[in-house]
Amino acid sequence: MSIPHNNCGKWVVAQDEGQLKRLEETHDHCKAIGVPTHFLSQQDARRQEPDVQAKAGILVSPTTGIVDSHALMQFLEGDFENSGGDIAFHSPVTRVTPLPTSGAPGSAGWEITTKTPDGEEASITAEVVVNSAGLSAITLSNSILPPERHLTPFFCKGSYFSYSASHPKPRVLVYPAPRPGLGGLGTHLTLDMGGRVRFGPDVEWVDDPTDLNVSDKNLAAALEDIRLYLPGIDAEAVGLDYAGMRPKLGRAGVSQIGGKGGFQDFYIKREEGFEGFVNLLGIESPGLTSCLAIGEEVHDILYS
């Protein structure tokens, strides 16, 4: 099966020297982990995307792209089932408990109990538990780990804005320079598989992870941010689209795990003292496009 995708590339744009410094730091980090990036000259930028403004510099990620997320999930579901896997939809986990043993918790395996839509409970046993429960991952982790290792979940809603005008219409993803403590990557320009332009997501800290109502409270601020890199935008053509929710391990630049300035996402770890239990916490939307790499990482953690 061919999964629709587009290796369109990504530009991260800087409008002043301070932002350029952050691009240089990002470039150095990418080199350290083997991710290809390079800076683009103003002349080449004007030739490739004349509507995009970057007064101080542009960092290009040439291997970045987009993927049809639904087609990807359908493929993974079918591949899993073809390999003998079973999926229990609409069956939330009510508890995960280690089977009785004189050794470390989990050394004899785990019992996972779920509840069906009609209220009946059913249990299975497993040697390994991988907690990839998304918005509920921290709650599930807290039900397994002792109180001194509990975490508080934080939720950051992001609203996207549609764009109905035919111009300007870049063919590359455009991101503003990183802003420490923001909680997101800034209001960026993204594309779908049909070439339609969207802007977002914005940042709105909420208490209810089910609140996916699209909010216009940050629309005016988003338009200001967008005009910095796309000055020719038609503001009248920008409207509300949809919203998503980011699971966070902290807020305002402070993580419960990494401290101030520490990582607030992508906590992937086998929990010490609990055999066969791997936590995936703070896995935001890039977790979908990086899901195969995450799977390889979890496999290596468990079996290498």
Image (cartoon, rainbow, N blue to C red):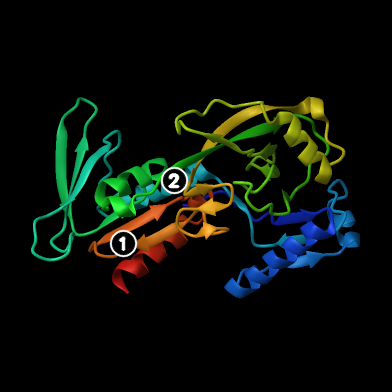
Report the front residue among 238 and 142. 142
Residue 71 screen position, x and y as percent:
48, 44
Instruction: Kindly report which numbered mark, 2 or 1, lies closer to the viewer in this rendering.
Output: 1
Q: Which residue is mark 1?
A: 271
Q: Which mark is residue 97?
A: none
Q: CA distance from mark 2 to mark 1?
A: 27 Å
Residue 2 appears in the figure:
no
Q: Secondary structure at mark 1?
A: loop
Q: Residues within 10 Å of mark 2 (few under 14, many from 20)?
A: few
Q: What kind of residue is marked 2?
A: Met
Residue 194 screen position, x and y as percent:
65, 39
Q: Is residue 14 left or right of residue 141?
A: right
Asked which quadrant contains residue 90, the reply is top left
Report the front residue among 55 and 120. 55
- Does 21 sit above or below residue 31? above
Q: Which quarter of the rendering shows the C terminus? A: bottom left
- Does 283 sit above or below residue 27? above
Q: Which residue is mark 2?
A: 73
2 and 1 marks in contact (CB < 8 Å): no
Q: What kind of residue is marked 1?
A: Glu
Q: Residues within 10 Å of mark 1 (few under 14, many from 20)?
A: few
- Does 216 sit above or below residue 152? above
Report the front residue among 129 and 195. 129
Q: Secondary structure at mark 2?
A: helix
Q: Is residue 77 left or right of residue 96?
A: right
Residue 234 appears in the figure:
yes
N-terminal label among 2 and 1: 2
Report the front residue among 295 and 226. 226
